[in-house]
Image (cartoon, coloured by chain):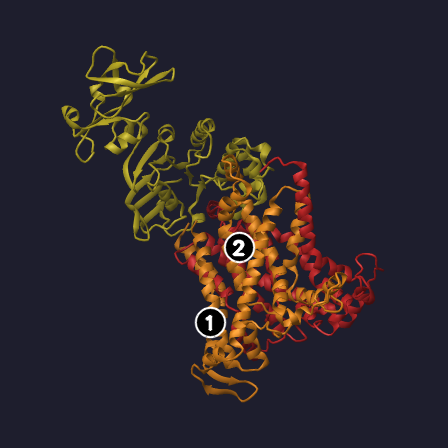
Amino acid sequence: MATKASRSAARLMMAPAVILLLGWMLVPLIMTLWFSFRTYLPLRGGDLGWAGFDNYVRFVSSSAFWPAVQTTLVIVLGVLIITVCLGIVLAILLDQPMWGQGVVRILVIAPFFVMPTVSALVWKNMFMDPVNGLFSHLWRFFGADPVSWLSDAATPSIIMIVSWQWLPFATLILLTAIQSLDSEQLEAAEMDGAPHLKRFWFIILPHLSRAITIVILIQTIFLLAIFAEIFVTTGGAFGTRTLSYLIFQRVLESQNVGLGSAGGVYAIILANIVAIFLMRIVGKNLDN
Amino acid sequence: MARAVTPRRKLINTGLAWAVGLLIFFPILWTILTSFKTEAQAIASPPIFLGFDWTLENYSVVMERSNYARFLWNSILIAGGSTILGLIVAVPAAWSMAFVPSRRTKDILLWMLSTKMLPAVGVLYPIYLLFIQLGLLDSRAGLVIVMMLINLPIIVWMLYTYFREIPVEILEAARMDGATLKEEVLYILTPMAIPGIASTMLLNFILAWNEAFWTLNLTAVNAAPLTAFIASYSSPEGLFFAKLSAASTMAIAPILILGWFSQKQLVRGLTFGAVK
Amino acid sequence: MGQIQLKQVTKSFGDVQVIPPLDLTIEDGEFTVFVGPSGCGKSTLLRLIAGLEDITTGHIEIDGKDATDLVPAKRGLAMVFQSYALYPHMSVRKNIAFPLKMAGMDQAEIEKRISGAASVLNLTDYLDRRPGQLSGGQRQRVAIGRAIVREPAAFLFDEPLSNLDAALRVGMRLEISELHERLKTTMIYVTHDQVEAMTMADKIVVLRAGHIEQVGSPLELYHRPRNEFVAGFIGSPKMNIFGGAEAKKYGGEKAGIRPEHIDVSKTEGTWKGVVGVAEHLGSDTFIHVHDTGLADMVTVRITGDIQAKHGDTIYLTPQLDQMHKFDAQGLRIA
């Protein structure tokens, strides 16, 4: 169906969404780009003129930059590995015939619905607190010295908290993908004499590859931007300052908008690189 | 898939799955349990699992002290407002893309998706500045707009994938039957897409409810929702486990319940229809 | 009233012209069938008439009035879709009432028309069911009911029977024909099935690649196909068409003879061949004959039964007055 009337109606009906998103994207983006080339210190005189690429150079050459990159990578990769591997195991487990499947599903999915500030706080205080946290009780029970998780092992702790939040997402998507696997394929493989491990390796895993890719890409985009979990637990201390947290600090805490904006541009470029891969997959899916 | 499994196998599966499920759920369970303890019992060593004196005291203290109701109301208004506003903008757009596709439709959809991937921190200051200029800082209206904008791509996408499942012929039949565009959308498309629209609303509500970057950075007192309410427990009140638990439970309970209803649609919404 | 005229109508999708300039008049009360192989543009043509697609150039007139720029609803036409396109969230009653409601008709008149249509279509007992609870044939009837209550100037049918099984199809074919006899309303019916076309139509329009190959009554098309394509498309089993020296003998570049116009003998005849498969239908026998030197296979239709089995030698004689001759362009000679 396509008449001139319906096509012009379609354009009209699409306009609000497109215009709003265009504004939402372009206005702040242009402002960020502009600031990134200015020396802009709101609390120390405001806009102090053109800075050229100084901010870009300074952001990268600051002593905080490379550690932040490293932290970002460690956290993103750590969470990805944990959630994808456990997600596959869990998805396969949940796909097995059992009693109370629906309830177990709900239990597993629940952490995804917990707001990030809550999960960060609950983990920080009730589990990882070195005096009263549940872990400290556990450690003492086994005769070990309690660990000050968020200062002595801050990055792994954050990886753990974030993994707990994102494991349901990975599990849910992989489970959906597994359930779409034609059971006749598996039965055929069984008839052909393929043992469990081989069936997993040659049939289930390839079938999941697309879903795994999507999980990785979508999680990466969200993980590059994690904020509340760090804000609430360590405030960026103890080596948990990620790239986005560093930018946040430059902009709001030290009020160096020019420098922060340059960092923001880096972050935008980084996110776009990931985004391109995701769009390819999603775009391909649109065609059929 | 009706494959026969030995009862023993099924029993093992069940035990294993329940153990894992409970382990994952444990932090939430523990929080809920702790919220009913006294502060002393909450930090007792060794920890008390069930054998404590159940009390509602923490809830009343938290409600009294921090004006929980206002935070809750802000959360509801911001999540609900942004969802409804987003739907009003997205339904026509999704209709256009699903039923009058052009060569650009795919590009527009992908572009919308790409705006979702803009790192918030990269545009924090401009938005902050604009909010000050427009007097929107710490206002619910401002947050409704931001939440609507950040979730608009997801709403459009989800609706688009649901709409595409409705045969065009039915809309054409309505057109032949004399329905105007408005009547076609109102009497035919919307009722047929109700399940899809409902789950889109639900997911969007959840995402807006849990959003913690903009709500933390753009609010102070007036418009602060539950995310900010909880963040204020960061310290030193965080050491009062029972009260922290009560506050947390109140912040997540509504959404946990909604979330369980929407879990089936969650996959489609979060993967932009790439996994169904 | 329901006379529909297409004047120099074309349709292009982007750079591709799917309907080259086309003129056609459908008279009031006529049952017209658009028939052709898939992709011939017959559905597109129907959608142009319905107003679901814009025509690129040209004019469409309905009852002498220009309808080119009218929206579908204003053309006074009703359409029955291939998938029936019933509103799944409405009861049968509401489905049928929908167009009347859109027209703002008063409730009493709506009720009257619904019960009228329901009794004609045997739907009275199903009025409060949802489409999902109906069988294919019942859904088809609801779709027709939704169309007839509007008392349109013309009905448009887009392959309405293709989703039904063979037995139901024959039944519905009769019902639609009877409906036309009773209503005497213009009907345009799109199908790829030439049997439907032959049995239902007053006028058949044979289309290929957007072109009208021939317009005529079923028997005109059967007896005097204008070209080789129509000759091969109309009639079942298909006409045997052959070229070469044999065709020249009968005065054409190509010649064709329908299976039912060939006489068979075990002893003598014009052509000699070997029986491949013989299909015994009881009333008729179809014999597929190989090695005649005409075409790969010649099909012969014999009324009644005949003893013929695989490998038998058989002699064929065409009825010369039923021979069709075509020139090098495939056009009919004489």
Q: Is residue A249 left or right of residue C206?
A: right
Q: Please count the marks in the image.
A: 2
Q: Is residue C253 left or right of residue C11?
A: left
- Secondary structure of residue under mark 1: helix
Q: Note whether B134 is above or below A221 in the view shown.
A: below
Front one among B48 and A266: B48
Check disc 1 and report the residue beneath it.
A26
Please identify which colour was used for chain B in the image: red
Q: Are marks 2 and 1 in contact (CB under 8 Å)?
A: no
Please identify which colour was used for chain A in the image: orange
Q: Which chain is yellow?
A: C
Q: Is residue C74 left or right of residue C11?
A: right
Residue ranking furthest to the bottom: A45
Front one among B155 and A69: A69
Query: Could you tell me which chain the residue with mark 1 belongs to?
Result: A
Q: Which mark is drawn over residue B187?
A: none
Q: Which amino acid is tagged 2?
A: Leu
Q: Is residue A232 visible?
A: no
Q: Note whether B239 is above or below A189 in the view shown.
A: below
Q: Horizontal and vertical percent for residue A104?
A: 67, 49
Q: Which mark is drawn over residue B159?
A: 2
CA gap, disc 2 to disc 1? 25 Å
Q: Which amino acid is tagged 1?
A: Leu
Front one among B273 and B143: B273
